[in-house]
Image (tube, coloured by chain):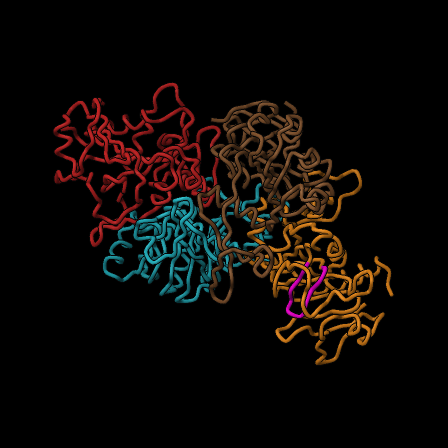
Chain colours: A orange, B red, C brown, D cyan
Amino acid sequence: MLDRDAKKVLIGKRIAQELKDGDYVNLGIGLPVEVANHIPEGIRVFFQSENGILGAGPAPLPGQEDPDLINAGGGSITAIPGASYFDSFLSFSLIRGGHINMTVLGALQVDARGNIANWSIPGKLVPGIGGAMDLVVGAKQVVAAMEHTDKDGNPKILEACTLPLTGAGVVTLIVTDMAVIRVTPAGLRLCEVASWTTVDEVVAATGARLIIDGPVGTFA
Amino acid sequence: MLDRDAKKVLIGKRIAQELKDGDYVNLGIGLPVEVANHIPEGIRVFFQSENGILGAGPAPLPGQEDPDLINAGGGSITAIPGASYFDSFLSFSLIRGGHINMTVLGALQVDARGNIANWSIPGKLVPGIGGAMDLVVGAKQVVAAMEHTDKDGNPKILEACTLPLTGAGVVTLIVTDMAVIRVTPAGLRLCEVASWTTVDEVVAATGARLIIDGPVGTFA
Amino acid sequence: MVKIISGREAAALVAPGSRIMVSGFLACGAPGWLLDCLVEAGVKDLHLIAISTDYDDRGIGRLITARAVKSCQVSHIGTNKTTQAQYKNKELEIEFVPQGILMERIRCFGAGLGGIFSPVGVGTPVAEGKETLTENGRTYILERPICADVALIKARKADTLGNLVYSKMARNSNPIMAMGAPITIVEVDEIVEPGQIDPEEVVTPGALVQYLVRKGA
Amino acid sequence: MVKIISGREAAALVAPGSRIMVSGFLACGAPGWLLDCLVEAGVKDLHLIAISTDYDDRGIGRLITARAVKSCQVSHIGTNKTTQAQYKNKELEIEFVPQGILMERIRCFGAGLGGIFSPVGVGTPVAEGKETLTENGRTYILERPICADVALIKARKADTLGNLVYSKMARNSNPIMAMGAPITIVEVDEIVEPGQIDPEEVVTPGALVQYLVRKGA
């Protein structure tokens, strides 16, 4: 079993391998941010933040924070050469118009049909929608970045989400600390298993049927 | 009977008197442009051109034309201090959103219900719509600036337009070389008659019933 | 015509029980001084339209903490514990609007449209009760205009004609909210004469602005 | 990723019979060099989306004069006698679209919307056959997205990432048409390195651009 930080790195690193040269990418708050730390050598990707930048750069050095440069989680960022600022209206037009190649989001639940729930646990915690509903509909690739199970070990990948949805039939790829799973019309296809675990353990920790129709790779 | 230039001046001058300090105004091509030459002293108005400027200024001196500064008719203009450039999308948002106090347009026909036709004579001449349909719907005041009759002396102000409409129930004021007519829910109210003509001549040259329910002023 | 007024005068333009729209994203680009003046004026029972309620002690959150808001349309409250508590207690009514669609709905009003067909939130609670359109196998839901009585926004600089420029990502919802209400009040760091802003750089033209307030004044 | 190509290569990206969108207002802000290359390439049977057909001998009009266009969606043809003649002869099919609504419909596509309810043209031929919505006594008509296979636009300057700035009123339809097609080709006067355009001044972000062509190249 990995600790939280190791899980984060494992997930971020694996998702980063999905990126292609020139991609425009939107990373959700929390876990997805880790992806930016693992861009494969030789490719260049451009980060969009829905609050109004294309070409977001890494966090500034301490003391050099600019209050007018923040990511969607409120953290300080920088702007790379060739960045642009724009209003939220244009920002979401880029998103819904299909100009963002990939969005990576955290999830409370995902299911066999590519549904995702990440904005509300009714009666308990309702942080809200933010930009997630636009993102899952608009981005070409929607990657759910999540721990495979919840704190109590219950599966978060289900036959059908039980929480209010963020998007229906939108997730294309699920990357967890245990597995890489593609959403296909036939259901969830297990593609890779983390090197620290096994196919059987992944199947046991998953609340939906996993299609295994070829060799299952590993990632680390 | 006035010549064409005198008519133009008469109409432009009279419409200019409708302007209030601080108004944002859009002038259509042709006759309406004359309004800009008669802004009353002591007030300041701002001219919008739908192709992307607020704060359009007069024509430049010969030899100082800038091909990237033109009005909706393609003529060279200047930009006043405090002008702004924007795209056609924002330009028409300003128009339809009610941020333009007055638009002045030429017309082929107007009628008793405030309908206006100015874009098509089927089978003969179809210059097209341009920005007129947005303008008549969006501007707070829609002023038809026109000669009272056509070349053959036939009325252009009718009970009901016969040409394809540009807008239905949108005209608020009609200013011609003969009269100032307000469009009211009850019909067309004759407010003023040009000093060179008479109420009877105006009534005879008009193809719609004119309401005369008070003193009729004159203008020159 | 644009008028320059004080923050106190601006707050007096917000009637109790009215609908206000406030710009900013997690307090970045929010009109902090106008919010201070509004809290100080003690205006209550407001309906708030905003991207989020920011933080408990910063940005729009101060209105929530002051219990000035009775209902709102926002996309997110995750960074404000007071908002979450008031929502749970049913002290505060919330319509959650997807962030991009919030911008679209405000602009619908600003651009004189009757609504848009949106692909966002189909199959989620956001779609409940809304008319739909299906086209080439894709479903859209009808989203209606959102407007306020007063919009409170923040710019870096204005000229006396109301032309605005923003600062970096503090632009966010400001240009759209500038068209979201018949009265737009802009907090600015600096007011200059016409001609001192390049017409090419103006983001919000003066026709969308009614009042300017210098920050701190 | 943005590629820099020649005008000839750009013309080769426009297939005969395809839908093209061309920017500009009465030839101001039109991609004159790309139009020259297109005429020279002899591409035919095009469907054209533009504000107007400009002048017989300038701007988009050259495509009409070359008989390259078989149908179009434009707001205006009043300045182009050849267009009027071809329309009268039924050589050229025209859908007249109100100028502001043309921008809205292109942006619908660009922003992933299914349509808008527009107040423009109600009670006129523009409304014929369109669904309506009535709200507070006001009627709106459903206007659908318009897109092209290729958009040809013009900017003053680009960086190699495709970020664009325009010149004064030559901006007009360019920023919206940049989102009107999966392939956007931009004619520019000048190409600079990333960082040489202030991020605050970028009007069209590079994500909307696929190809850059230096004017005359």
Q: Residue at x 67, y 57 (%)?
A: A45
Is-magenta flag for residue A195? no
Q: Residue at x 65, y 52 (%)?
A: A129
Instruction: Name the one closer to the observer, D161 or A59.
Output: A59
Quadrant (top left, top right, bottom left, bottom right) of the C terminus of chain C: top right
Does residue A83 appear in the picture of this structure? no
Is-magenta flag for residue A110? yes
Q: Residue at x 19, y 40 (%)?
A: B158
Q: Position of residue C108 (x, y in %)?
A: 48, 46
Q: Which residues are magenta?
A: A108-117
Vertical comparison of A157 with A55: above or below: below
Residue B220 placement, left or right of B77? left
* Residue at the extreme top: B42
| Number of numbered callouts drawn | 0
Q: Position of residue C106 (x, y in %)?
A: 53, 44
Q: Position of residue A135 (x, y in %)?
A: 62, 56
Residue A182 sits in quarter: bottom right
Residue B96 sits in quarter: top left
Instruction: Name the one closer to the observer, C166 or D184.
Output: C166
* Residue at the extreme front: C90
Residue B202 placement, left or right of C183? left
Instruction: Name the one closer to the observer, D175 or B201.
Output: B201
Does residue B133 appear in the picture of this structure? yes
Vertical comparison of A151 with C94: above or below: below
Vertical comparison of D214 with B64: above or below: below
Residue B76 placement, left or right of A144? left
Vertical comparison of D137 with D49: above or below: above
Instruction: Name the one closer to the observer, A120 or C119.
Output: A120
